[in-house]
Image (spheres, rainbow, N blue to C red):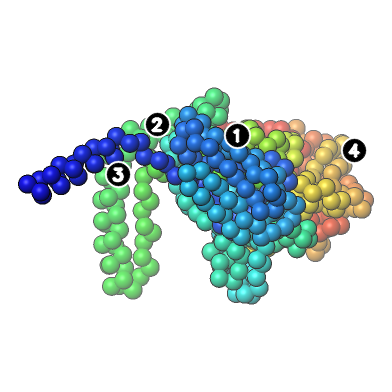
Amino acid sequence: MKNLKWFVSLIMLFCVLSLTPAVAEVRLPAIISDNMVLQQGPGAPLWGWADPGEKVTVSGDWQSKPWRTTADSSGKWQVRIDSPKNGGPYIITVTGENTITIKNVICGEVWVCSGQSNMAMRVGNTNNSKQEIAAADYPDIRLFAVARKVADKPQDDCKGQWSVCSPETIAGFSATAYYFGRELHQKLHVPVGLVSSSWGGSPADAWTRYQILEADQDFVPIIERYKQAIIDYPENMEKYKQQLEQWKEDVEKAKAEEEKPPRQPRPPFGPGHHHSPAGLYNGMIAPLIPLAIRGVIWYQGESNSRRAWQYRKLFPAMIRNWRQDWGRGDFPFLYVQIAPFQGYGKGGRVCPELQEAQSMALSLPNTGMAVTTDIGNIEDIHPRNKRDVGKRLALWAFSKAYGRTLVYSGPLYKSMLVEGDKIRLFFDHAVGGLVARGGPLTFFTIAGEDEQFVPAQAVIEGETIVVSSDQVPTPVAVRFAWINEAEPNLFNKAALPASPFRTDDWLCTTFDNR
């Protein structure tokens, strides 16, 4: 009987507890955690989740007055704090029904670093990696790598953690991001936070919000292809499984015969694929918003090269999308122009057409483009020199984000003037004159009304170039570095290379590709 009474009492207690609402602990996103860099200045958002209506207090040990707020009906809360200039380490305390302490916080400059494989390329895979890794002792540079994730809808959190830059932590981090951040840290003498969010082989459409894509007829084919891929996915997945089994057999056979094994088949396009429209925006960018940032660096374009004409609209649309959703105005958006690569098709024009599309994004406010025609590798789409890439991005940052006066760009084509049987070209960023490295200028072609381009002579005259050919007595257009593998030798006095360009507006080879 005594045991029965005890059992009944236990059941009643369980019923009471089950009817009592559970108290949700205050929770923070992964990007707000120990070792983080907080963007210096006023109005930096800190946010998280709690019970609806729960009061939340946020305190920073650099001042006595806390920030207070109340979780909304969905449990979300946010405060905007004023962070001190260039300092730390600090402690931030978040208190609701529970208390979270964020330790070793420093205030400085935060940059998001995104793109495909050339942004994802690790320090350990680049030039002089052993020496660079050994020297990477920078406790005021902090690193956050967003875990790869494809999502159908915008996510409110991601996986990842902040780490202090050291020889032990840098090898697997984005090389372009690191060299960019190190340059800022060394020249500006401020802490730098680098948030790496990249995925090799990803197109820009995967990093763009779905509503942006479906609202433009030039982007609708991207969505239609994906919808069809979803329909075809079960059948294609079965074929892939069969191919995978055959591949395993072929690998074993190759080993036995000491031959090179065949390439592994790729899984079919479909759900969860990193080419999914908006999939990476949803899973790897949305969770970072509204983190206070100074700006973005971007290294991508190779996967959109066959759709270069479409990229003219897609890339600017993506930039505007990020700026709008972040709500921080036209923050600096700095990007790398893809390097020449013969793998696009020797003698073809896919690469310069994509480079042209990238250069057109300079028409947006507060953008910048690092040209890499001289530091690529025409036999490798993943050039190993990422240090100079980071430095060139930093030059744009010094000008666009930090107001420094310096030469930050190589020559950019501005206009042309026909002078009889010659064409004179004018450039921006050519102050002090132009330079031809290692001999006469290379990769200039010229054409008449027949649109047939032939190799041309190009001669520097101060800050201009005069182009001509005996084969074209009445020229109308000039092109520069207009083939996939072009590695031209035109620079300005600051040793920065000129971007490929053309003076005509004749149709591109990628015009119909959507």
Q: Which residue is mark 3?
A: 237
- SS for dot 1: helix
Instruction: Compare marks 4 and 3 and give the one earlier in the sequence.
Output: 3
Q: Which residue is mark 4?
A: 419
Q: Is residue 488 left or right of residue 80?
A: right
Q: Nearer the viewer, mark 4 or mark 1?
A: 1
**Label 1 to label 3, Cα distance in Å?**
35 Å
Instruction: Compare marks 4 and 1 and give the one earlier in the sequence.
Output: 1
**Residue 325: assigned label:** 1
- Amino acid marked by disc 1: Asp
- Amino acid marked by disc 3: Met
**Label 2 to label 1, Cα distance in Å?**
25 Å
**Label 2 to label 4, Cα distance in Å?**
53 Å
Instruction: Compare marks 2 and 4 and give the one earlier in the sequence.
Output: 2
Instruction: Compare marks 2 and 1 and give the one earlier in the sequence.
Output: 2
**Label 4 to label 1, Cα distance in Å?**
48 Å
Mark 2 surroundings within 10 Å by alpha-carbon count, few (fewer than 14), some (14 through 19), many (20 or more): some
Q: Which residue is mark 2?
A: 227
Residue 492 lies in quadrant: bottom right
